[in-house]
Amino acid sequence: MRKTIFTGAAAAAAIAAALLPPASAQAATTTATVVSPKRPLNVREGAAVWTRILRTLPNGTAVSIECGVKGQLINQGPVRVTDQWDRLTDGSFVSDAWVRHAQPVPPCTQAQQTAAPITAAAGQTTPGNVASAAIPLKTRSGPARAALQYSALPNGTPLNITCQLQGERITGTMRITDQWDRLDTGAYVSDAYVNRAATPPSCTAIAPPAATPAPPAPAAATATQPQSQAPAEAGKTRWVNPLPGFSARPGFRTPTNPNHVGVDIMSFVGTPIHAASAGTVVEVVCNIEAGHSCDQTGSATIGGCGWYVKIQHTAGVSTLYCHMVRRGVVQPGQKVAAGQVIGYVGSSGNSSAPHLHFEVHVSTPPTSPGNAIDPLLFMRSHNAAIG
Ligand SMILES: [Zn+2]
């Protein structure tokens, strides 16, 4: 059973964001007052302190709360200890630990949680055009070269940029940057190759593109085999980031989630997941609470890690990859190389947003919660730091 620590509205916003209309015409709001005497309160894009700060509010500021979502537990606020985050009327979030309100805050409906990001709500785009010289600029499902490619735009193609998201760092013709532009089509292009007069606003939710295509069919996927990476040195075990271009946050056995024995790497549905090292696939399994399907988007209330793949490596190390969008594209008993695609990111099982839950176990087989170690430390020590 894997409890994902990624909860809250940024997460929920990623689920089927394209499918549900923004809930702008919701019921009455709850008026509240910021209680933050020592420093201004951070207003964030999601329900956790690791999400981007959009602005700050001084002590005593009146705010209008639309609804509340479950997010990161905050135990240092002056008003209460709570994991509730309040969604303000513009779609941003503040921890409920730092605001006082006379009326209770109603829980957000799914439509509210999946409302359009606030920058997109303005309905404005930043114009630009492709400046990639001879090579067409690839549009992708996420802010990294590892994301699925949608199309390739010739030099000079006009672009309508909705917002920018941090992703893989790219050296391009216009700039060196880790910013990726989300286009009005929902696809992403590296801002390194975009000529534009103004800086687009930041994207406020990890929402999948509007036009997310179905992940590749299994047959095609298996054909996309290892990445173009150097062969392992003889006698040395090579480790690679299973989800290059995306970052993980520390989440291994946290005080608030001691049973979380992996890390969560936020991504996009359909992003290829790579074997972290060479090994043998030992399990390709749907792990989910009875009555649910791994082929459907999961939720925080469903138990199980969804579609997962387990790989046995040398020296008793095993790795586990959870929440795949569908069955992994490898088979039990199959030998895999470091970097080989084994499946695609999804949100099956106990998951509130598309991500990879990644575990590393030692002294295996068998794997157990007791022999899980912090994947971030392990990967960093094996020259394959995640994010
Ligand atoms: Zn997790």
Image: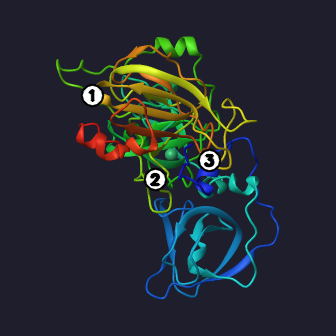
From the image, tell me which residue sits under label 2.
198
Label 3 to label 1: alpha-carbon separation: 34 Å
Label 2, secondary structure: give it: loop
| Rendering quarter of residue 191 | top left
Going from N to C along the chain, the mark reached first, 2 or 3, is: 2
Label 2 to label 3: alpha-carbon separation: 34 Å
From the image, tell me which residue sits under label 1.
315
Cβ at disc 2 under 8 Å from ligand 1: no
Q: Are marks 2 and 3 in contact (CB under 8 Å)?
A: no
Label 2 to label 1: alpha-carbon separation: 52 Å
Residue 251 sits above or below residue 83 on the image = above
Label 3, secondary structure: give it: loop
* Residue depicted at x 49% and y 59%: 51
Q: In this view of the protein, which residue sits in the foreground, 91 or 340?
A: 340
Mark 1 is surrounded, within 10 Å at the Cα level, by few (under 14), some (14 to 19) or many (20 or more) other residues, namely few
Question: Where is residue 204 drawn, in percent x and y?
Answer: 55, 55
Q: Amino acid at mark 1?
A: Ala
Q: Are marks 3 and 1 in contact (CB under 8 Å)?
A: no
Q: Amino acid at mark 3?
A: Ser
Label 1, secondary structure: give it: helix
